[in-house]
Image (cartoon, rainbow, N blue to C red):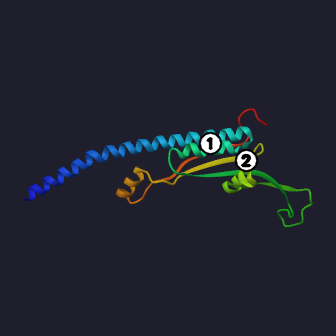
Amino acid sequence: MDDIFGRLAAAFMTIVALFLVPVILISLKTEDAVQSFVQAEAEQFVDESRAAGYISPENYLTFVNSIGRAGTFEVELEHRSEVAYPVTEDDAGNPADGHSYRTGYKSYYREEILDEMFGGGSDEPYLMKNGDYLTVTVKGTGSSITNAFTRMFLGSGSGGTMAVYGGMVGATGGLT
């Protein structure tokens, strides 16, 4: 009697393994393909925006719609622009001469960028200047088959960042 239960359990585990392993392998390959696609789309979007010196509403919407066909993603944008500000005190704490300044970066994020492009009812490009930095981060928010298996067997899903890409505006070899 014990031998029958053992054989049934072994047969059940074999059947599960024969169907489960190929499904996991296919889902891993699919996730790799989606990862590559999203990375390529992010690179194209950033490179076009950097070369143009602005983010056009059409380019942004094309990018978001394109990756949206491959899954559910959250797109984060960051534009860092170098700014100069006057120095009020020197390093010793003495009042500055009024002619000194320092430089730093001011960051603008997705909400500000989209508000400038789509706010006010008109589609206006978001302008950047030579030397600024543009970075796009794409995070997967949907649940894939791979995430479901990972959660089932390991207790946590992978999800997370699918693509990060950025660079300097105007740094394409010929733009000033």
Q: Position of residue 73 (x, y in %)?
A: 54, 51
Marking on residue 123: 2
Q: Nearer the viewer, residue 83 or 3?
A: 3
Extreme-left residue of the structure: 1
- The amino acid type of the residue labelled 1 equals Thr
Residue 22 is left or right of residue 132, and the answer is left
Q: Nearer the viewer, residue 75 or 39?
A: 75
Marking on residue 173: none
- At mark 2, the secondary structure is loop
Q: Position of residue 112 (x, y in %)?
A: 71, 56
Residue at figure coordinates x 43%, y 51% from the top left: 144
> Does residue 170 appear in this view?
no
Residue at figure coordinates x 73%, y 54% from the top left: 119
Circle 1 residues within 10 Å: few <14, some 14–19, many ≥20:
some
Q: In this view, does 56 lie above or below 10?
A: above
Q: Position of residue 166 (x, y in %)?
A: 64, 45
Q: Is residue 173 above or below residue 102?
A: above
> Does residue 140 appear in this view?
yes
Q: Do the residues labelled 1 and 2 touch (CB within 8 Å)?
A: no
According to the image, label 1 marks what residue? 62
- The amino acid type of the residue labelled 2 equals Asp
> Image quadrant for the N terminus?
bottom left
- At mark 1, the secondary structure is helix
Q: Is residue 130 above or below residue 5?
A: above
